[in-house]
Amino acid sequence: MILRAVAAGVAVAASLCATGAPAPPPREDLDALRTRLDAVQRELRASEGDRDAAADRLRDAEQAVSDADRRVRALAADRERAARDLERLASRARRARDGGVAQRAQLERLLVQQAMRPEPSALALWLSGEDPREAA
């Protein structure tokens, strides 16, 4: 549209130059040209406003993408920390379970040894209600 208005202006200028003497253009042509020029200027201002609005939307979208990317990185770091904490707790649970199993096995061995002794142990005397100091 802008090119048509410029072309019309060039055509008018060329016609003036071709005749040798500047003949005033008809009044209707000048009015039409002014009207067209005003319309082109309005379109230009509108497109500049659209471009500015699009630039603002693009800037907002880029900011949103940047914020989301930062949040994703923070969540990934949190997930890695949680995974390390979970592994550490699982390891502690395994050690505690293994320690409990070992203690139970040791207790079983001690009880078997005490049960196989010919004389009653202090624990057996105490459990039966007798005083272990008197039996000694």
Image (cartoon, helix red, strand yellow):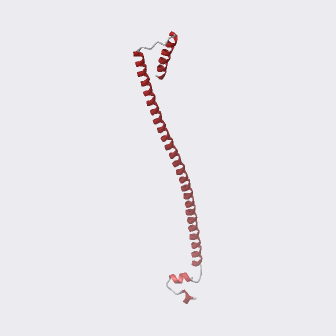
- Classify 56 as above or below 93: above
**In the depicted structure, whether residue 50 falls above or below residue 73:** above
Residue furthest out toward the front: 21
In the rendered view, would you say 78 is above or below 99? above
- In the drawing, does residue 120 fall left or right of residue 33? right
Task: Tell which of 112 and 132 is nearer to you.
Answer: 132
Instruction: Check the picture and name the quadrant holding the C terminus.
Output: bottom right
Viewer-side residue, 60 vs 117: 60
Residue at point 53%, 46% (across, down): 69
Residue situated in front as seen by the camera: 87 or 97 = 87
Res 91 quadrant in image: bottom right
Q: Quadrant of residue 133?
A: bottom right
Image spot of residue 3 (x, y percent):
49, 21
Give coordinates of residue 74: x percent, y percent: 53, 51
Tell me residue 10's x, y (percent).
50, 17
Up/down of 68 relative to 28, above or below: below
The location of residue 132, given as percent across then percent down, is 55, 86
Residue at (56% x, 83% y) in the render: 122
